[in-house]
Amino acid sequence: MKETELLELLEQTVEKLSITLGYDNLRKGAINTTGGAFVLRGERHILLHKHLPTDEKIELLSEILSTMDTEQLHLPPVLRQRIELTKEHLQLTQDSSANAS
C-alpha cells in the first residue's frame, strides 16, 4: 500500500472517531512541534505540522490512534495491524524506560 493511501485511511479513521484533524505550520514562532492530540472546549482535535513528510504524518497519526479505542470501528486489516503494532511498540518503549529508572 502506498504511503499516501495509508495516510488517507488514517485520516478517515480520525474522522470516524469524530476528531477534528488539522494541518498547520507548527514550527514558527515560539512553537516547535510535530503535532499532537488535545481537547479544546470539550472537542477532540489532532493538529500536525503541515510540512512533515508523509511517513512522519503516518507515524504520528498511528501513535495517536494507538492510544484510542478503535475496536468498534471497521478498519482495513492493514490499518488495524499498523495501529496494533504501534501500540505494542509504545508499550515496549514505556516498559524499558520504566525498568531503566
Image (cartoon, grey):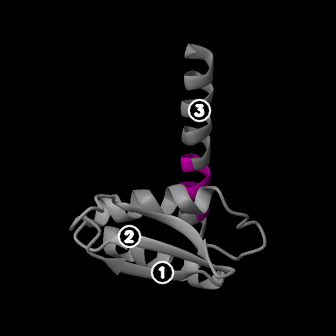
Residue found at the far top of this picture: 100
Q: Position of residue 52 (x, y in %)?
A: 25, 65
At numbered mark 1, what does the secondary structure look like: helix, strand or loop? Answer: strand
Kindly indicate whether the residue at mark 1 contacts the one at mark 2 (C-beta within 8 angstroms). yes
Q: Residues within 10 Å of mark 2 (few under 14, many from 20)?
A: many
Tell me which segment is drawn in magenta.
80-86
The secondary structure making up most of the magenta span is helix
Q: Which residue is mark 3?
A: 94
The answer to whether the residues at label 3 and label 2 have Cβ atoms under 8 Å apart is: no
The one of 93 and 20 positioned closer to us in this rendering: 20
Which badge, 3 or 2, comes first in the chain's sequence? 2
The one nearer the camera, 60 or 6, is 60
Q: CA distance from mark 3 to mark 1?
A: 26 Å
Residue 3 found in image quarter: bottom left
Residue 49 vs 66, above or below: the answer is below
Task: Kindly identify the amino acid type of the residue bearing the numbered disc 2.
Answer: Leu
Q: Earlier in the sequence, mark 3 or mark 1?
A: 1
Q: Quick one: SS at disc 3?
A: helix
Find out whether residue 84 is within the magenta segment: yes
Q: Quadrant of residue 42?
A: bottom right
Name the residue: 43% across, 73% down: 47
Q: Where in the figure is residue 92, as x and y percent of width and height?
A: 59, 31
* Res. 21 mark: 1
Residue denoted by label 2: 48
